Image (cartoon, rainbow, N blue to C red):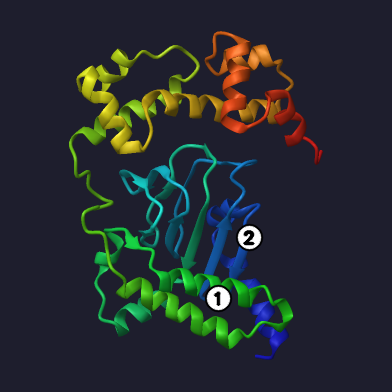
Amino acid sequence: YDNRERILYMIKVVNSYSENAKELYDNCNLYYNENIFIAEYNFPNKDEVKCRIHSHDEYEFFVPYTPVPFLVNEDSIFFGERGYIYPAKSNSNHGIKYGLSNVEYTDVLVKKEYLDKIMNELNCSDEIFNHPIYLSRELKFYLHIFEQEFLKNDQKDLVKLDMVANLFCRELISGSLNKDINIFKEKQSYQKGIYLVADFINHNYDREIKIEEMAELAGLSKNYFGFAFKKALGETPHSYLIKIRISKAKVLLESTDYSLSEIAHKVGFKKASSFTSQFKASTGMLPSKYREYSRKDY
């Protein structure tokens, strides 16, 4: 192919990704060639990541740059830690279970036949899809080089992109795994109860939830529950509840004309003043200013 034909071919390849996968990448920075597709989500302060359970033919590698709770791979739910890459097999159900804000991540999709060929060359087993992969300096370097080359637009070296994509995939396959974490199995018995409580919070954030109620739901003592929750999700039950309430309030501020008092009530705050002070503490701005900011492009 000449340069123009190769570019047209790449566009055709990207357009061939299943609609269910493509719709996830609105407002992302995209980098791709005919074998690899990188979506970089880096707008944590304005946007909320929606619930994104999906499947597609490509292999996917999820790279969180901030903690991302409630990653899903088939029927398992686990916590995404910075410094790891979380793999998903072709045609598996995977993604983010709940809407979240203040998160950053990169998705890497690799054509199945392309990665299968490299795996066969390296005599690799499917074990790489059972455990997180350490985000090594080499993997970060290859991602950076691929992105920088792609941004040269018409001047980009397509052969170089091919080579870097190949190196990235080979490093993924041969990289070290964190075998202490099996993404298809809960390693600690209390975690199922913690996820049950978090799911409960996600659906009942608009009312008062007492610590005793949550501890009982988790099947843990009140004293141990707070420790177990923070260990599993990285924050206390109260801070998680506030995070969910503020996240829901952002959606209402952006998309409705409800008064601040109405929004405060809808997301579980008894007083508008409490909502205002907590919102400012969490976001750095008053709810009214956030509403103005979020709508300035309309």
The residues tagged by marks 2 and 1 sit, at their Cα atoms, a distance apart of 15 Å
Name the image quarter holding residue 186: top left
Q: Nearer the viewer, residue 2 or 212?
A: 212
Name the residue located 65 percent from the left edge and 72 percent from the top edge.
11
Q: Residue furthest top?
A: 270
Q: Nearer the viewer, residue 42 or 255?
A: 42
Name the residue located 21 percent from the left edge and 54 percent from the top edge.
180
Q: Residue 292: x, y in percent?
A: 77, 30
Picture mark count: 2
Task: Give the residue at mark 1.
Answer: 145
Task: Give the residue at mark 2.
Answer: 29
Mark 2 or 1: the one toward you:
1
Name the residue located 36 percent from the left edge and 13 percent from the top edge.
210
Q: Residue 279: x, y in percent?
A: 60, 24
Q: Residue 158: x, y in percent?
A: 61, 84
Seen in the picture, residue 181 relative to 15 is either above or below; the reply is above
Can residue 112 be seen in the rendering of this structure? Answer: no
Residue type at tag 1:
Ile
Identify the element where label 1 is drawn: helix
Lower sequence index among marks 2 and 1 = 2
Q: Residue 103, which numbered label?
A: none
Q: Dot 1 surroundings within 10 Å: few (below 14), some, or many (20 or more)? A: some
